[in-house]
Image: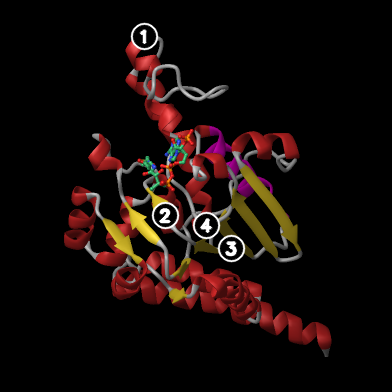
Amino acid sequence: MTQAPQETGVTEPPGEEELSRAGLRLTVEGAVARITISRPERRNAMTGRTWTTLAHIGQTLPEDVRIVVIAGEGDIFSAGIDLGMFTPEGVEGERSIIGGLTDGSADEADLDAYIAELQQGFLWLRRPDLVTIAAVRGYAIGAGFQLALSCDLRVLADDAVFCMKEPALGLVPDLTGTKPLVDIVGVHRATEICLTARKVGAEESRELGLATLVVGVDELEGAVDDAVAALLTVDHGAATATKDLLLQAEGNTLEEQCAAERAAQVKRLTTLAKAMAAQA
Ligand code: ACO
């Protein structure tokens, strides 16, 4: 079964203060939520708080939201993790990722639990009841690339540049990005992209299937709006059931997938029949 909305008991969406401390902006209009990574003075670099707040946004989206668009403020998507997170002193008001290991106040299990918490900020973007779109201008480095990879669609401006920088910093990509990267480009190309930490431009991203669409910088907003409008023409129940099926496909045998298709269709037909009967 694929990722479903989490039952966390959290019902209140993040307020302006939480959003601002996380370097995020959020607007929700009807079926569309727009999240902007907004720390332009740090090239939209993200902190632990960015991802715990992203998770909070996911937990508290109104039920009628169907589309989530994530973009960066200005001419860059994100410079990835705030590098201050790797210094012993960390980023002000944030837990340092390695500080606890250097001073002995945290052990490996603590760190594992902390990273799991941060990954929640990325995982919910796969939810079948949502279609998530990364609108990418300029650099999407490291965690920024992984955030874009967590989305269903990546609409790129022609100045977009992906880079999986983590191995060049002695790290691994750990914010849920390795699976979608391999799913999209295959293990061999993913190995080359990660282990060289090289830049992958918009045209190459289109060729590799990393970009759903590449447009001129000035056309990015309009292209995303067009994609949103097209996605909203499909019935929400059908969209959710179809994304759920598609997400299962790779891990299923043909037989299992056929069974999943039948089960989903029976539910759809039952829903449609009830709606027809109610109208009659
Ligand atoms: N963390 C913290 N601060 C950052 C980051 C970052 N990831 N990226 C940029 N900044 C800061 C710079 O230190 C600089 O601050 P200053 O004005 O106080 O000196 C400011 O943002 C502007 O940065 P520049 O490098 O001058 O911007 P430029 O447009 O020339 O380059 C680029 C942008 C390419 C994104 C460059 O800043 C860069 O390479 N950043 C680091 C990327 C990185 O290694 N990210 C971590 C990847 S690993 C992961 O995400 C898990």
**Residue 67 visible in the picture:** yes
Please name the residue that numbered disc 4 is placed on: 75
Please name the residue that numbered disc 1 is placed on: 103
Please name the residue that numbered disc 2 is placed on: 139
Residue 228 to residue 73: above or below: below
Q: In the rendered structure, which disc, 2 or 4, sits on the residue that comes first in sequence?
A: 4
**Comparing marks 3 and 2, which lies closer to the viewer?**
2
Residue 28 to residue 106: above or below: below
250 vs 125, nearest the viewer: 125
For the point 37% across and 68% down, the residue is 202
In the picture, measured across the screen, residue 276 lies left or right of residue 162, that is right
Q: Main secondary structure of the magenta part?
A: helix
Q: In the rendered structure, which disc, 1 or 3, sits on the residue that comes first in sequence?
A: 1
Q: Amino acid at mark 3?
A: Leu
Please name the residue that numbered disc 3 is placed on: 130
Check disc 1 and report its element: helix, strand or loop. helix
In the picture, measured across the screen, residue 45 lies left or right of residue 171, that is right
For the point 77% across and 85% down, the residue is 277
Marks 4,1: beta carbons within 8 A: no
Q: How far apart are the two marked residues, 4 and 1, measured between alpha carbons?
A: 38 Å
Few, some or many C-alpha atoms within 10 Å of disc 2 (few <14, some 14-19, many ≥20)? many
Q: Amino acid at mark 4?
A: Asp
Residue 147 to residue 239: above or below: above
Quadrant of the rendered structure where residue 29 is?
A: bottom right
Few, some or many C-alpha atoms within 10 Å of disc 1 (few <14, some 14-19, many ≥20)? few
Beta carbon of the mark 1 residue lies under 8 A of ligand 1: no
Q: How far apart are the two marked residues, 2 and 4, measured between alpha carbons?
A: 8 Å
